[in-house]
């Protein structure tokens, strides 16, 4: 497929690996550890595993898989809220497929559906709006989920509902924002990170300027990266080059998709519809200030949190689940006590095992549990 | 949800609502193109555009020049390496 295949060329990948090896061999390395690079985005984590990139890199480089998987960082209490809305007999609850199996404290949306709740999987928020038009006697609630990548699509759908006067449509807004989260990671004590691969599709919306503080204040290099294997390898090479040359800049490897200024139309829809929440609770990371958005007062009639009574309970993660430590890079997925035993993609305990973009599911699917357990 | 997929706009369905049909590897579906149109690039000029599609919305027009540029850097990298390798081999002879 055009714009995909040419960035998957195996021969070019081998050239890049060689370049990376040459760069690393000429670098002054940290005394007691490898070079730590964090890929912020779960899409990158998925590609890294799918193409086995981690195993191709020299051992001096270690990738830390960051928190950028919106399904994975969803706290259990929010899943319970979804289930509670979905179990209202008037409601059709529309969600992306990724969210169906995320465990709540009692059940997932998939289990709620099996027990009779009207939960529908949709590809697009527009499909949810179409459901509302088709079912005027029902209330359609769309589960708004994702970082800035999907935030504009939900906003534009709400604006369309307003323009068309569709009154039986609302959004349970769980959209989150990446920059405060990167800052929280950079501020966490004892964290050792040498550079970042920046999230390509978030950046396509917000542009590259919002990351400048990472280079200027924290003196860490970041390269906004595409998602194909060559994109990721080239971005790693660019970050290493910055480290070697003592630079910390925000560079853009993914200029074919990411304009430096972001997407003006998308940003304007976002600022029209949403405002920042004071704080948002993340699975594993706790509460992070200004890291989520909610609908503005003017769109209250499209806000499921205003339309329905929502339990909004804070539920602690299961004791045996170590998703938080994995998210922060403190332990590797296979070092978790329940990885591959009590927690598998079929019966996930923790969110990182649910989505294919979660670090645990990626290790499980592509790494082979046995190999990792033996390596410990 | 977050990865998106490249496709080509083949038809404008509703200029007012900014809806267009996109062809993604042979699969066609109606998507919203509000995020890729502006004064310089109005709705009717979008047919033929390569776009990245996320959850039913075109979120970015793929910049063909930048794509070619990235590939050129990668190709040159390979050529430079081949050259160095050839020099190394000939020096060893």
Image (tube, coloured by chain):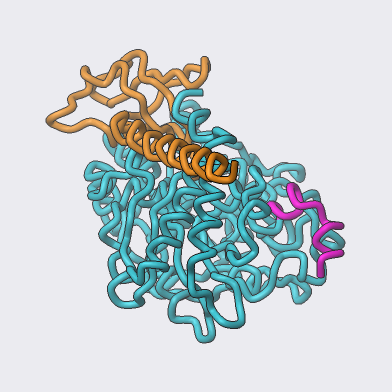
Q: Residue furthest front?
A: B93
**Magenta residue check for B87:** no
Can see residue A77? no
Front residue of A138 and A159: A159
Chain for colour cyan: A
Q: Is residue A201 left or right of residue A60?
A: left
Considering only vertical position in the picture, is A188 above or below A165? below
- Tell me the quarter of the image containing the C terminus of chain A: bottom right
At x 69%, y 52%, the residue is A362
Q: Is residue B33 left or right of residue B78?
A: left
- Colour in which chain B is shown? orange
Q: Is residue A133 left or right of residue A49?
A: left
Considering only vertical position in the picture, is B66 above or below A203? above
**Magenta residue check for A363:** yes
At x 53%, y 34%, the residue is A123
What residue range appears in magenta? Answer: A361-376
């Amino acid at each position: 497929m055009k714009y995909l295949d040419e960035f998957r060329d195996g021969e070019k990948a081998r050239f890049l690996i060689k370049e990376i090896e040459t760069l690393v061999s000429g670098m002054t390395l940290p005394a007691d550890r490898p070079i730590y690079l964090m890929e912020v985005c779960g899409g990158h984590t998925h590609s890294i595993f799918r193409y086995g990139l981690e195993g191709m890199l020299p051992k001096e480089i270690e990738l830390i898989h960051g928190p950028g998987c919106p399904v994975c960082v969803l706290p259990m209490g929010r899943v319970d809220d979804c289930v509670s809305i979905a179990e209202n007999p008037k409601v059709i609850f529309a969600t992306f497929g990724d969210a169906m199996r995320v465990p709540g404290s009692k059940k997932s949306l998939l289990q709620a559906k099996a027990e009779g709740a009207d939960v529908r999987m949709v590809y697009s928020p527009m499909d949810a709006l179409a459901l509302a038009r088709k079912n005027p006697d029902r209330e359609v609630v769309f589960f708004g989920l994702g970082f800035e990548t999907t935030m504009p699509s939900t906003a534009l759908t709400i604006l369309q509902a307003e323009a068309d006067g569709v009154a039986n449509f609302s959004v349970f807004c769980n959209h989150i924002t990446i920059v405060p989260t990167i800052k929280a990671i950079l501020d966490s004590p004892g964290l050792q990170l040498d550079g970042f691969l920046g999230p390509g599709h978030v950046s396509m919306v917000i542009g590259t300027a919002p990351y400048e503080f990472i280079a200027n204040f924290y003196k860490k290099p970041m390269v906004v990266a595409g998602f194909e294997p060559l994109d990721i390898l080239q971005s790693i090479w660019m970050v290493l080059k910055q480290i070697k040359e003592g630079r910390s800049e925000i560079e853009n490897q993914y200029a074919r998709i990411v304009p430096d200024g972001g997407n003006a139309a998308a940003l304007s829809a976002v600022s029209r519809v949403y405002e920042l929440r004071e704080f948002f609770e993340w699975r594993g990371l706790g509460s992070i200030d200004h890291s989520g958005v909610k609908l503005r007062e003017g769109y209250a009639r499209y806000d499921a949190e205003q339309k329905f009574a929502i339990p909004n309970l804070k539920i602690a993660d299961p004791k045996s689940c170590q998703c938080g430590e994995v998210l922060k890079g403190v332990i590797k997925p296979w070092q978790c006590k329940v990885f591959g035993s009590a927690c598998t993609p079929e019966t996930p305990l923790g969110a990182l095992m649910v989505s294919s973009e979660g670090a645990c599911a990626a290790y499980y699917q592509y790494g082979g549990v046995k190999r990792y357990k033996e390596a410990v | 949800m977050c990865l998106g997929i490249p496709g080509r706009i083949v038809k404008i369905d509703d200029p007012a609502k900014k809806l267009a049909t996109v062809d993604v590897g042979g699969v066609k579906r109606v998507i919203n193109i509000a995020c890729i149109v502006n004064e310089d690039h109005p709705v009717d000029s979008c047919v033929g555009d390569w776009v990245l599609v996320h959850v039913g919305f075109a979120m970015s027009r793929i910049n063909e020049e930048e794509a070619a540029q990235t590939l050129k850097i990668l190709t040159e990298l390979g050529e430079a390496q081949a050259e160095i390798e050839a020099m190394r081999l000939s020096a060893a002879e």
